Image (spheres, grey):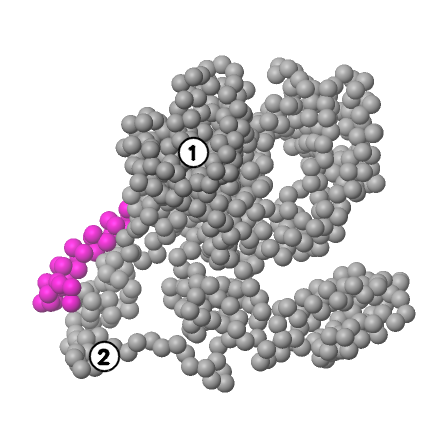
Amino acid sequence: MSEQLTYKPQELQKMDAYFEDILQSIETHLDDTQEKQIRKAYETAKEAHRHQRRKSGEAYIFHPLAVAEIVAKEMGLGPISVIAALLHDVVEDTDLTTDYIRREFGEKIAEIVHGLTKIKRLPKEKNISLQAENFRKLILTLSADVRVVLVKIADRLHNMRTMQSMPRHKQERIASETMYIYAPLAHRFGLHRIKTELEDLSLRYTDPEAYFEIKRKLAETRKEREQYIKEFTAIVEERLKKEGFEFEILGRPKSIYSIYRKMRQKNVEFEEIYDKFAIRIIYKAPLELEKRYAWNIFSIITDYFKYNSDRVRNWLDQPRSTGYQALHVTVLGPQNKWVEVQIRSERMNEIAEKGYAAHYKYKHGGKDEASELGIQKWINQLQEILNDPNEDALDFIDDIRLDLYSDEIHVFTPKGDVISLPKGATALDFAFHIHTEVGMHTRASEVNGKIVPLNYVLNNGDIVRIITSPHQHPRHSWLNIAATGRARSKIKAYLRQEENDIIEQGKEILKRKLRSLKLKYNEQTINQLQKYFKLKNSRELFYKIGSGEIGNDELKAFANVQGNIILKLLQTSWPRRDKKKKTAIPQPVEEDINYDTIVFGPDEQRLDYTLANCCNPLPGDDIFGFITINEGIKVHKKTCPNAIYLQSRYAHRIIPAVWIDSTKEKYKVKLKISGLDRPGIVADISKTVSVDLQIPLEHIEFTYLNGLFEGLIQVRLENTSELKELMMRIKQIEGVKKIEKV
């Protein structure tokens, strides 16, 4: 390590101070050996990354330092995790090897670093997703050590915090992948604060306009929230103190993303969302009295405020599988506003913020922590899925994601055992949760003493009994019933094996039938059969023969017209080679009066495309192209409901796209306007549209009732920017309260 480092003196001073601060935050848990190992890891990373800088120009070493800080301070993990965080990129980005890490830092550190090292290349096969395979590799290592994923979440969090210098298309891809995979993972490990930040940062890059608008409005209403918390606190504080509680009352605004999601789901404006924050009461209590104190506080709160019994959430007796414990109640607070009150002990609050790591800190007795949280069972289920060699990485992500993000319900076996399942789970999911063989042979289910279909959606507190039969086996229709990754994975594995068996039978049947028809069994004949029966591939051909869908009569008919088929194939499939004739190279579409207004990729190529029906992009919208299998390029808005799914799952099939000429044709747009009636308001709106902005006004219609007005105007616009300007100007007119595109 004698080679000169390429750091500036001020950078060295800054990074050393940064490291010492991290070390100080965990030094109370360190012995001398551990401290030496952490210092060694820092020096190793500092030298290994000496020639590297990030897109922002900052020395790369600040990234692993930041990841180590998140691991130590925000997750509360120990020295092994901090060392792994400092070294997490050295194998991937420098000359150091996993063997070197193993020799210098031991097997455990090497194992975690290996799990964090990305796959750089994959075989060029159809539909292989590099990020999906990397995620699969990450989860494979998870079964050996949970800290692999925790360090990876910290790594992703810092990348999301520092993406400003990246190109827009990369920001969108990484943000979509974060929303689709890493935020749900953080949720599964109980890292609530980190999950919330990942969601908010993802929204910042996938829909920046909505993100900054909500952020601005939250800042504007901050004083109002603070005043409300004071009112609430003033009512209950004296009583809580009188009862001897040590506590603090906090008001936390809901996350930007949660408000955004609610606005989308309910199709309402920011002002129409009333539960923008929650009140949290955090109290001190010895472990054995935590539950009693929580219910006492609940009793005091509900003495003063009416509460909604349907909105009481008791996670004291049945914590979530993430370890989360609390008592929630929604009450009608001051100013007759419904507000959620979360009642937590200090221990519960730390677990809610730091998840798995904090739970470990408070563990009592010798019980295995991962098992105690239900995490080990989940990891074991993932391992079962991964052990299936045919499981596609993309399908794997979709399957496990079903179990990551959903709320939980608790149901019971006939013996009274509690089973945790994702909300929306069916009786069939319950069967596969009990045991794979039970699921495979499920014939019917009984819930609360009544026979119900397999697609019955379970509710909290249901008592479930599964009725099996040795003659029952999974069917394709079960995939429409199963809601959990475990059940879907097992069903698909069985169906694949069944399909393979039928295909093998089909091969043997075809060989015999062709022999009797005096035809050769070879690749040429199989190709002719595929074309004759209009099938996609040989597997489909063998399957249809093995299942009896293609029988003797159909094969005889094929044999009778074989000569014509061969002739046709010769004419269409195998044209003569002309050495002088060169293969035509596709040229960009020439511009004419009907030319495309969208260009694709860094070279701004003109390509054929269609506009996606799910979001109907308009000229001027932020868009991207998605290369489909059968329908060419589909153009989606970046705010399309399917955008995050496509960007995260199929990033290799996303191409940048922009509108290049949205001024040739004006588009008809209808706007609905409402607000408080006053003399001259229609004239002001007309003047703003026609005179100030010089936009053609084709139709205007207003109605009035009880001092309110509602109007509809129709205009012709050139692009989305013009629409935004028009809506903003109209909203500024006195009396206008709401404007929206119809």
Residue 727 placement (x, y as % from top left):
72, 66
460 sits to left or right of 149 = right
Q: Quadrant of the N terminus?
A: top left
Query: What amino acid type should be assigned to the residue bearing mark 1?
Result: Leu
Task: Give residue 671's quadrant in the image.
Answer: bottom right
Task: Give residue 740's quadrant in the image.
Answer: bottom right
Task: Give residue 678's quadrant in the image.
Answer: bottom right
For residue 582, the mark is: 2
Q: Nearer the viewer, residue 90 or 194?
A: 90
Q: Nearer the viewer, residue 255 or 418?
A: 255
Q: Nearer the viewer, residue 40 or 734?
A: 40
Residue span colored magenta: 497-524
The residue under the point 65% across, 52% down is 212
- The answer to whether any part of residue 52 appears in the image is yes
Say whether residue 513 is magenta: yes
The residue under the point 80% across, 27% down is 236
The residue under the point 51% across, 41% down is 157
Q: Is the residue 523 above or below the residue 95 in the image?
A: below
